[in-house]
Amino acid sequence: METKEKLPFYGAMTQVDRVHQELGLTGKGVIVGIIDTGVDYNHPALGGGFGPGYKVRYGRDLVGSRFNFSDPGSIQPHKTPLDTCGADFPQSGHGTHVAGIIGAYDTRYNFTGVAPNATLGMWRIFGCSGSTTNDLVIEALIQAYETGCQIINLSLGSPSNWPEEPSAIVADRIAGRGVSGQKHLAVVVAAGNEGADGAFMISTPSTGDRVVSAASVDNDYVLEKTLSPDTADEYPYILSSSTAVFPNGTLVAFSNGTSADGCTAQANGQLRGAIALVERGQCEFDVKAQMAAAAGAIGVLIYDNAGNDAFAATTLTAQIPVAACSHATGQRLLQLLQGAGGAINITFNQALSAVAVSTSRQVSGFSSTGPTDEIGFKPDIAGVGGFVFSTLPLVHGGYGTLSGTSMASPFISGVHALYRQAHTNSKSLYINEQFQNYALPAMRNNRTDSPVRQGAGLIQAYDAIVQKVHVSPGHISFNDTIHRTEHTLTISNHGNLRVSYTIQNTVGLTVAPYNTTQQDFAPLQPAGDTQADGTADIYFSTVDVTIEPGETASVTVRVSDVKGSVKNEPYPIFGGYIQLNPLTPNTKILRVPYIGIQGDVSQLPVFDVDFPSLSSPSEVLVVGGQTNNKTAHTIQRSTANNFLIVLYRLLTGTAHMTTEVLDQNQREVGIASTLDFLSRNTMNQDNFASSSIWNGTVLVPGTAAMETTPLKDGVYYLRWKALRLLADPKLQESWEIRTSPPITISS
């Protein structure tokens, strides 16, 4: 790895550099467990080995490199958690990157992780490709707990959005129980990368109540290679997945003075022996490379169709080098080309440079948005997860930049290690609250962003460690309108001086979860900011508080009004920060983030229009969002059409969905299936609807193994019942009910 300067890190954003320099804390004596894809512990920055005396001291490989999550027989455990995937798997190395964020230390490049002297454990639960299982996540959690890890990091998850999901339950219980029965263990989990999919999309197991759900904020800088045109200015670029080195040469626009999209053949003689500039979009990157190569180009530079940051282009079959840059860089290069007769010399520098990120300190666009389906406060807090430089397996070059809440989570885990070194006896709940108290809310369009995007805000390590005043709870969910209650804040002064504060409501952006222009309750992707001119008013029992050393004070808070046009928005998610402004020198602002929903969420629809729907195996399930609306269906047991496909699309999550079977007189004869804790679907093609099959059977009552028995020939109906959000299952009106057309079963 070659750099032109010292590596930029995110210490200044989060006060980690102050903790290292002024407090001398490095995580020494703290064990951080990681559940991930394995680690290249031979990396010098990660200690160069495994076991006693090494940085990576604990853990094992629970699955092996060839593990396929759909084939339990493919599991081949190993004693050490080494990432053995090699160069044939360019997407591997996730766990090594995570481990480096927490604890890397490399004097050659002045590279330091958040807690460089922490001891690491790694439990590998992924093969070289594919996913993993809930059972393996739970097994790894238990092993990390039994090893004595004080912090467990999981940079993984699936968008369940329910705290009752099995891995979330186990993570929550471990976080509550702690090591050796003492409540000193933190479980930190990535909130998810579904920010583009709208609200109510938090990944499990970060949904666990006592689990720290990690949102992502973009870094100040990113280490990137830069290109230099004749002007000597430098602009960042990123090599594609199939490109190792990009040549210098003459840059020419793909289509005679304009970039075009490079998706069709071009008879441009200037391209021969030159580098083609093309715009992103309309076809795959490999196609653009193919078209440019056919015209004689020696490389392709693709600029984005929007935005100010370079992006990574994935290429698999490109015959010539491919690189990518931002939209702003592409526009600047086009200007230079037009002023120079259509061709300029360009140099692609191989050294890494620190490049400012245009979205610095803002919530990353990919970071998942809360709350949970029970209106639980998630995510909890944010770490740096956008444009993070860290270790990679040596076979992949040793270092690289990745983005995701997978990077934010280990950052927060590392800060927890620093805190635990300083305060060895603090309980996990107290630590979590302390970090929320002193976090710094991110901004969005010059306004304080919503807690459902960032939790309490960006973690601030130094303030949380040294400040002596504490507020509990660390966050509040005011729930929906029907379930709204008041809350009591307890402010504790653990210092030796009297402290005084004034209390105010700092309003955050109100989030719009629904796209009412398309359909009343279609999810808005990504969740928008309402144009409303008001939000929640918060009542405080007092706005001035003074606390003597060793004493506490209580403040009652409640939503007194939802003002302005927010009232007229469809279920707006309001939020903000109860802010304690200090009147005492050398004390910092404390904040308690809050969220709430205006409206009765039990009145929200569960099923989308025309769902659930039935189709035979030979029929198309969904085309352009349209369902199959046949008036009758048949299960012919003697043919290939011996089952039906049930397609259901959820606009909101549901804690319980039951499929009942009715006879031709609409009397219930049995239960076809029960499903619990389902998340809503999205507008994306791969998650527009969910499916199951029904083969004309019902569950046998009282059997734990979900045994079924076939129905007699005849005419039946399926009746779907889904429990509305926060509704009482004992009440008939709490269930949304749909009934199928008649289904004829014959032998």
Image (cartoon, grey):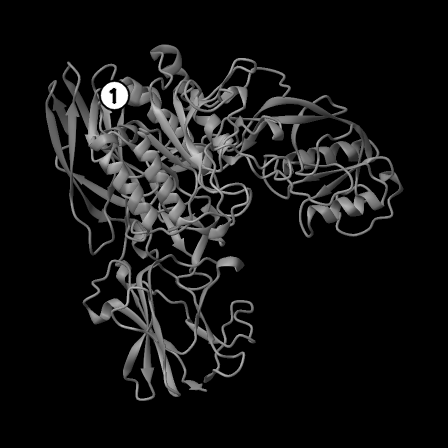
Which residue is nearer to you in this view: 353 or 260? 353
Residue 307 lies, in percent from the top left, at: 58, 39
Which residue is nearer to you in this view: 109 or 561? 109
Which residue is nearer to you in this view: 512 or 38? 38
Using the rendered view, name the quadrant where residue 661 is placed.
bottom left
Q: Is residue 152 left or right of residue 641?
A: left
For label 1, the residue is 424
Taking 641 as reference, is 432 above or below it? above
Residue 403 lies, in percent from the top left, at: 51, 35
Q: Residue at x 34, y 65 (%)?
A: 605
Q: Residue at x 47, y 76 (%)?
A: 643
Q: On the rendered image, what quadrant is the C terminus found in?
A: bottom left
Query: Label 1 crowding class (10 Å Cα cut-off): few <14, some 14-19, many 20+?
Result: few
Q: Residue at x 36, y 11 (%)?
A: 24
Taking 729 as reference, is 614 above or below it? below
Using the rendered view, name the quadrant where residue 666 is placed.
bottom left
Q: Is residue 187 left or right of residue 82?
A: left
Residue at disc 1, secondary structure? loop
Residue 171 lies, in percent from the top left, at: 31, 41
Q: On the rendered image, what quadrant is the N terminus found in?
A: top right
Residue 337 shows in the view: yes
Q: Residue at x 70, y 32 (%)?
A: 244
Residue 380 shows in the view: no
Which residue is most to the right?
Answer: 269
The amino acid beneath tag 1 is Thr
- Tally of numbered tags: 1
Residue 458 lies, in percent from the top left, at: 38, 30
Q: Is residue 89 left or right of residue 649?
A: right
Using the rendered view, name the quadrant where residue 514 is placed.
bottom left
